[in-house]
Image (tube, helix red, strand yellow):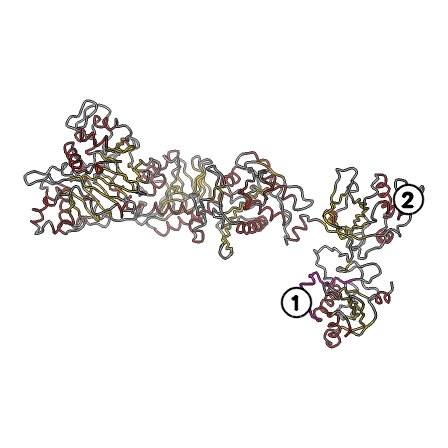
């Protein structure tokens, strides 16, 4: 039975998809918790992922997708994962990545810093080797970089996934899931434009199928309203409205009003028309909207997301469930949000459901 | 009748070769030709339908035989021409013992008749030869001389060669004198077959048969001849003031007064049998005689009633001595008592007194097995009624549909044996206190309720010193489980149960033992699910279970067994389970019980990893209602655990799967209950600061589940159990 786990990470992202066949697909890894701060309620994501794999008796993860290389999506990744490009990232207890997914920007962006630089080196290393990677882009974008490596686009076409297509790694028939790529799309990143990471991040719709019942999950990265508007417009223009339907929607950018519209609104953000249509006409009954963020402030006018005005818009959507990762099941004691996907579509697993197995799926703290 | 007359009755003397019965002819020829048979031919006689041989049979007789048998003995052997029955064998020597066992009761005037074999005649045809038959005769003579032909525990029931009918009488008439006020009624079953019962309710019995019930003075042996008249019988039994004829006359006058002229008058005579003169009565030789075809005829023969005026007495008539009153002898069979049932079943055990809980499929059949073996329960408890789906595997029949199982089963069990006190029934839910009084008074409790809740309540909540023994089937019905407490109840039923689960979790033979069966639906309700399983298998387990219960009850120690039936081959394998006592410690409001197996295991694991610490997770069962934690085993440290001399991190690689599989295998009866880790030599089992952090982590995870966080710290000399350390409840157990 597939399931989706959203980790409580503050305003950072990490979503783990467990496929029916046991494959694991991790979208982003933003482990910003502070081990020295006992009041920090954010999860130790590194340990959580270790426990998750140990529980499944795996030492590698099938896919790690970095939707873009911002800190809140990659923090701590270079300490946890085995990286092929340098021996210093190859300790015995590191977790191997069978396949890495990155946007083209992760290859061609020249402004990376810190961990982003390391992951970029890894992505470039893999692309150069031609295995263990999928780069999400229009192929032409990579032409120059590949040329500098003495390669052509056709040499690496098997590693490149264009928008409007399905990621070939998985199929409904074999894995019970398919990933449709919404972003980055072709008209971005022409030769004159600079890289804007949020706009050039990976946005996919995952379609699960269990006993003939399909469940659609939108993984919205950090895209802003205008980019989301473009995604809607392009997809509609291609007559692919089904690719905009959703049962689970991971909100872009930690419930930022900017992912709905330019204007925040006093108490409620009013989304632009296409986005309103996306949320209101395309969300199936009982759909779950997930804000991967700190708790929604009750009042005030914070600059940083989550924005209560945006949240008010989502809370006002009748028949939809709005869940905030740092509020689940309570803001005083957030736990990973697990969404089960079965023949009844998506449902939030109860906080007690893991039960006793929760204890045995984790390592203990050190006893002395 | 002289001997000559008796022989002449078998026809003229003929040459042995001309005997009509083939077997007679073959024996005659054989004993003439084969000297080793040590039989001497005397004469042969032939008449219509029978062939007779007179032979002298030699036998190996000691100098001082118990019975006066000699060698040779002259025997008359009478063969039936149709060869459908054993030849009759008569001892012709004057003075041949007439009171030895295994003499048939022959007609008066005939010599004593030997009962050679209890085998049906048809069954011995395959083995028959002249030598075979000679050997039988020799065996009878030799064994009778030794006095061991008759087994000590075998009641003597002389067979009447020409009985006029058969009476089935209450078994207590064989054991004790009838009460003189008892009235007897005969129920007609078939021609000349009656069942005699007490009917003290009816003041004036209107039965076809009327009984004169009499107790004769004691004798040293049973009556071995069949008297022809009341006078002859009186001559055998009268004495010590007992006057049979006068007693019968008193009965006849009473029957006459009751106008029961047409009823058949019967004599039911108890003759006390002692081993020696004046010795204690060991049993009663019960004899029945038909005295006449009706009361008036009897009165006429005794000279006290004029058949022309049956209502009137003959004025002043004392009557005669009964010489003219002929007797028809009836065979008597006593009903089955607890004691004789036990003997028939080969059970030597003293009487069992126990209360049975559960009258379901297994329970009802198991109780029937025990009852037939002479060990009925004193009480049966059950709350359910018999529904149609039960009948596929239940003692009760469809005529009891809708009946309360406890009542119907108790009634059925009470109908098996005669004379045992009726089985009491209690329509009660043992989960409530409704039946506590009867359970607290019990000497032994047999739980066949197939309910864990009942067994737990019995083990813990029901007061009383009665040992508890539980028998139940696994969900598939293929295996039978016995859990028996010791007499002092140190190994309680609940202790045995959780340790049994641990065996199931770990031993290969039990891999499928608790595999859940979906059951079969018998009604419309959600809970109308019944187990599936074969009656043939259940019958095997009901048999094994009854025997196992008797064995366990005769032993003082705790025991636990599983019998597994392979339905393909019918083979039953038995496995013995750990019944070592659990160690108890009180922590906070909880009682923590630890199995010896667990304590051994953690100590062994600790020693194996020294100087490092090690640990693992604890498997057990929690009784949240009673606040009892049972710790029975552990799952070893996963491979990603980290161990140092000063610390331990229990990893998680594959752990959840291992624990989940283990718990699933025991049907959820065991679960994760906590963590253990070791402390090195030289360190106490006091929790360290790290331990407190680890405990807090455990507590956070488990308290949401409402479960007590349990941590064991295993040291060199003790094991410390921690629950709610904030309450400071720590205890040493080892």
The image shows residue B610 at horizontal and vertical percentages of 34, 51
The image shows residue A317 at horizontal and vertical percentages of 26, 28
Chain containing mark 1: B
In the image, the segment drawn in magenta is B113-130
* N-term-proximal mark, 1 vs 2: 1
Chain containing mark 2: B
Q: Residue A304: in sight, yes or no?
A: no
Asked where in the image residue B628 lies, by quadrant, the reply is top left
- Secondary structure at numbered mark 2: loop
What residue did someone put label 2 on?
Answer: B306
The image shows residue B387 at horizontal and vertical percentages of 55, 40
Asked where in the image residue B704 lies, by quadrant, the reply is top left
In the rendered view, tell whether residue A303 sits above or below residue B687.
Answer: above
| Residue B445 lies in the magenta-colored region | no
| Residue B126 lies in the magenta-colored region | yes
Give the camera-side residue of B643 and A333: A333
Residue furthest out toward the left: A192
What residue did someone put label 1 on?
Answer: B126
Mark 1: few/some/many CA within 10 Å (<14, 14-19, 20+): few
| Residue B2 as seen in the image, left or right of residue B725 | right
């Amino acid at each position: 039975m597939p399931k989706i786990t959203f980790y409580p990470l503050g305003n950072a992202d990490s979503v783990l998809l467990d496929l029916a066949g046991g494959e694991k697909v991790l979208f982003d890894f933003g482990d910003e918790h502070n081990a020295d701060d006992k009041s920090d309620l954010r999860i130790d994501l590194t340990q959580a992922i270790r426990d998750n794999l140990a529980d499944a008796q795996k030492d590698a993860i099938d896919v790690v997708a970095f939707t873009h290389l911002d800190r809140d999506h990659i923090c701590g990744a270079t300490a946890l994962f085995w990286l092929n490009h340098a021996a210093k990232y190859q300790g015995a207890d590191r977790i191997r990545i069978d396949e890495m997914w990155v946007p083209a920007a992760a290859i061609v962006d020249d402004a990376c810093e810190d961990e982003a630089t390391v992951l970029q080196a890894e992505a470039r290393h893999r692309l150069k080797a031609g295995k263990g990677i999928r780069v999400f882009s229009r192929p032409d974008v990579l032409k120059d970089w590949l040329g500098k490596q003495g390669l052509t686009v056709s040499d690496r076409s098997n590693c490149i996934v264009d928008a409007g297509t399905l990621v070939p790694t998985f199929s409904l028939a074999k894995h019970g899931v398919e990933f449709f790529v919404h972003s980055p799309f072709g008209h971005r990143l022409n030769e004159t434009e600079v890289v804007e990471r949020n706009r050039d991040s990976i946005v996919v719709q995952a379609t699960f199928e269990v006993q003939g019942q399909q469940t659609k999950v939108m993984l919205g990265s950090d895209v802003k309203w205008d980019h989301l508007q473009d995604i809607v417009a392009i997809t509609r223009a291609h007559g692919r409205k089904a690719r905009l339907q959703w049962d689970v929607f991971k909100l872009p950018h930690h419930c930022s009003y900017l992912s709905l519209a330019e204007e925040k609104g006093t108490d409620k953000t009013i989304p632009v028309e296409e986005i309103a249509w996306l949320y209101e006409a395309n969300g199936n009954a009982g759909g779950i909207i997930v804000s991967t963020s700190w708790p929604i402030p009750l009042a005030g006018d914070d600059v940083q997301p989550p924005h209560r005005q945006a949240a008010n818009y989502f809370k006002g959507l009748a028949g939809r469930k709005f869940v905030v990762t740092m509020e689940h099941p309570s803001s005083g004691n957030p736990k990973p949000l697990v969404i089960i996907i079965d023949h009844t579509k998506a449902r939030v697993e109860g906080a007690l459901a893991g039960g006793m197995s929760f204890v045995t799926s984790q390592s203990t703290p050190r006893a002395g | 009748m002289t001997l000559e007359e008796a022989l002449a009755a078998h026809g003229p003397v003929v040459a042995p070769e001309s005997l009509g019965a083939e077997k007679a002819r073959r024996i005659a020829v054989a004993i003439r030709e084969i000297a080793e048979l040590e039989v001497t031919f005397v004469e042969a006689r032939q008449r219509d339908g029978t062939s007779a041989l007179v032979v002298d049979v030699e036998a190996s007789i000691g100098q001082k035989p118990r019975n006066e048998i000699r060698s040779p003995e002259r025997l008359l052997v009478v063969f039936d021409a149709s060869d459908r029955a054993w030849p009759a064998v008569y001892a012709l020597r004057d003075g041949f013992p007439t009171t030895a066992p295994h003499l048939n009761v022959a007609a008066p005037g005939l010599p004593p008749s030997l009962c050679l074999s209890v085998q049906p005649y048809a069954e011995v045809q395959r083995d028959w030869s002249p030598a075979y038959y000679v050997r039988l005769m020799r065996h009878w003579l030799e064994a009778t001389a030794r006095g061991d032909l008759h087994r000590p525990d075998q009641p003597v029931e002389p067979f009447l060669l020409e009985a006029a009918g058969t009476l089935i009488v209450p078994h207590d008439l064989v054991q004790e004198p009838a009460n003189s006020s008892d009235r007897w009624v005969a129920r007609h079953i078939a021609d000349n077959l009656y069942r005699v019962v007490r009917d003290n309710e009816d003041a004036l019995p209107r039965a076809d048969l009327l009984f004169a019930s009499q107790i004769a003075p004691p004798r040293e042996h049973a009556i071995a001849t069949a008297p022809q008249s009341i006078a002859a019988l009186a001559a055998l039994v009268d004495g010590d003031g007992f006057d049979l004829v006068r007693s019968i006359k008193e009965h006849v006058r009473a029957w006459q007064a009751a106008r029961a002229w047409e009823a058949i008058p019967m004599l039911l005579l108890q003759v006390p049998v002692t081993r020696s003169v004046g010795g204690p009565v060991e049993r009663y030789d019960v004899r029945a005689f038909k005295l006449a075809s009706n009361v008036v005829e009897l009165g006429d023969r005794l000279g006290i009633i004029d058949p022309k005026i049956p209502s009137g007495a003959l004025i002043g008539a004392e009557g005669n001595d009964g010489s003219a009153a002929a007797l028809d002898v009836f065979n008597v069979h006593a009903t089955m008592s607890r004691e004789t049932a036990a003997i028939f079943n080969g059970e030597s055990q003293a009487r069992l007194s126990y209360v049975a809980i559960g009258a379901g499929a297994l329970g009802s059949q198991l109780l029937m097995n025990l009852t037939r073996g002479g060990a009925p329960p004193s009480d049966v408890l059950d709350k359910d009624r018999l529904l149609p789906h039960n009948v596929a595997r239940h003692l009760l029949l469809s005529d009891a549909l809708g009946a309360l199982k406890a009542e119907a089963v108790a009634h059925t069990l009470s109908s098996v044996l005669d004379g045992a006190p009726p089985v009491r029934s209690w329509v009660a839910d043992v989960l409530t206190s409704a039946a506590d009084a009867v359970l607290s008074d019990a000497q032994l409790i047999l739980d066949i309720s197939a309910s864990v809740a009942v067994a737990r309540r019995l083990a813990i909540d029901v007061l009383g010193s009665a040992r508890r023994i539980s028998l139940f089937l696994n969900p598939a019905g293929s295996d039978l489980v016995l859990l028996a407490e010791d007499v002092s109840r140190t190994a309680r039923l609940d202790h045995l149960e959780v340790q049994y689960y641990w065996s199931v979790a770990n031993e290969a033979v039990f891999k499928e033992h608790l595999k859940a069966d979906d059951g079969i639906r018998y009604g419309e309700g959600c809970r109308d699910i019944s187990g599936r399983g074969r009656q043939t298998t259940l019958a095997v387990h009901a048999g094994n279970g009854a025997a196992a219960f008797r064995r366990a009850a005769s032993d003082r120690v705790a025991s636990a067994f599983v019998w597994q039936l392979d339905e393909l081959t019918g083979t039953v394998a038995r496995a013995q389970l750990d019944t070592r006592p659990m160690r108890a410690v009180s922590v906070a409001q909880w009682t923590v019980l630890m199995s010896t197996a667990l304590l051994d295991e953690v100590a062994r694991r600790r020693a194996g990893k020294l100087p490092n610490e090690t640990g693992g997770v604890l498997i057990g069962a929690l009784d949240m209602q009673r606040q009892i934690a049972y710790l029975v085993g552990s799952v070893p440290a996963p491979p990603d655990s980290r161990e140092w001399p000063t610390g331990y991190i229990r990893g998680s690689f594959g752990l959840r799967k291992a624990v989940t599989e283990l718990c699933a295998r025991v049907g959820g009866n065991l679960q994760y209950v906590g963590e253990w880790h070791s402390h090195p030599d030289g360190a106490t089992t006091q929790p360290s600061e790290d331990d407190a952090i680890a405990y807090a982590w455990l507590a956070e995870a488990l308290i949401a589940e409402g479960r007590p966080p349990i941590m064991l710290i295993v040291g060199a000399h003790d094991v410390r159990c921690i629950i709610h350390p904030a309450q400071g409840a720590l205890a040493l157990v080892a």
